[in-house]
Amino acid sequence: MPASAPIVTIIVPGRDVAAFAPAALDSLRAQTEPRWQAILVDDGSVDETGAIFSDAASSDARFRMLRNDEPRGLGAARNLGLDHVDTPLLGFLDGDDELTPTALARLTGTLDTTGSDFAVAAYTRARFDGTAYAPGRVQPWVAAATSPERLGTTILAHPQASGNIVAWSKISRTAFWGDLRFPEGVAYEDQVIAQRLYTRARAFDAIPDVAVHWRVRADGTSITQGKAQLPVLRDYLAALDGGIRVLHDAGASAAVVARLELILAMDVPPLLSIAAEHPDPEYAAAVTTFIDGLKAYPEFTDARPDHTLAEALAW
């Protein structure tokens, strides 16, 4: 293989992200590892996203563009890209996020050294500070998943890795994916897939380097900012439970406990706050059913909810 041949394909899905897509593509162009190519998937955009992707593909052979004429969602867009990967390694970058300059060098280099099935890195949230989007610190659950560096580990040896559930924090061997594909037609499509990667891996690498700045949009249009909407909530709860189920069925009990503790600390309290004021009683009912489902897992007795939360839910 020539030295200049691409070793990794980055799948970049986007729908109506024209305000952010140029920065995402520039973050690829700025990579210190030059042996990459990107599949840009326009998921039925009605703004200039398609034109931005098309211009990139026309001017730089490293970019290739695919398009869904109608929006099909992130899962379907990523799956379309997956079907066209022809490099030994693959990864993802949402069209409104940005890679750090050494992300690909660090992740692909780690895999080259270890031979593991995939490598997972840290990430930060980038929030609008009134002037620009500024990345914050690595959040505690992300740090617990990726720091200190662990090479050739497993989910049984490192259960806290299960807290890093986003698709775009990882570089994988393409052959490792096989026929694995994202769920389509739902939000939070990467959570179950992440746990399948962890439980199927012969070995994976966890590194503390920040690979991605995840943009939290100032206008509140990110999928993760729509949890007050009942359909989004249902997808969210199904994804959380689906990920736990994958870990449970794989016998990764310590990882189940780790996920339960994180969900009880980070996910349940804000959902309860929304439910308390939500006009649709179905919202509170869905949250209650979800919590009852968490309690039904055998590993729940080993989870340690916050004292205030435990009192509120009459643990």
Image (tube, grey):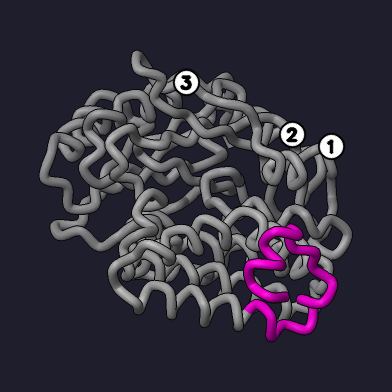
Amino acid tagged 2:
Pro
Amino acid at pointer 3: Ala
Q: Residues within 10 Å of mark 2 (few under 14, many from 20)?
A: some
Viewer-side residue, 204 vs 229: 229
Which residue does the image show at 34% across and 46% down from the upper left?
222
- Mark 3 near mark 1, Cβ–Cβ under 8 Å? no
In this view, 27 is above or below 90? above
Type of the residue with mark 1: Pro
Picture quadrant where residue 196 is located: bottom right
**Residue 177, magenta (yes or no):** no
Asked whether residue 83 is in view, the answer is no
Residue on which disc 2 sits: 208
Q: Nearer the viewer, mark 2 or mark 3?
A: 3
Q: Is residue 308 magenta?
A: yes
Nearer to us: label 3 or label 1? 3
Task: Give the residue at mark 1.
Answer: 148
Side of 254 where 82 appears, left or right? left
Quote the CA–CA distance across marks 2 and 1: 6 Å
Region of the chain picked out in magenta, as a range? 294-315
Q: Earlier in the sequence, mark 3 or mark 1?
A: 3
Decide if residue 54 is on the left or right side of residue 300. Answer: left
Asked if marks 2 and 1 touch (Cβ < 8 Å), the reply is yes
Q: Position of residue 186 (x, y in %)?
A: 36, 68
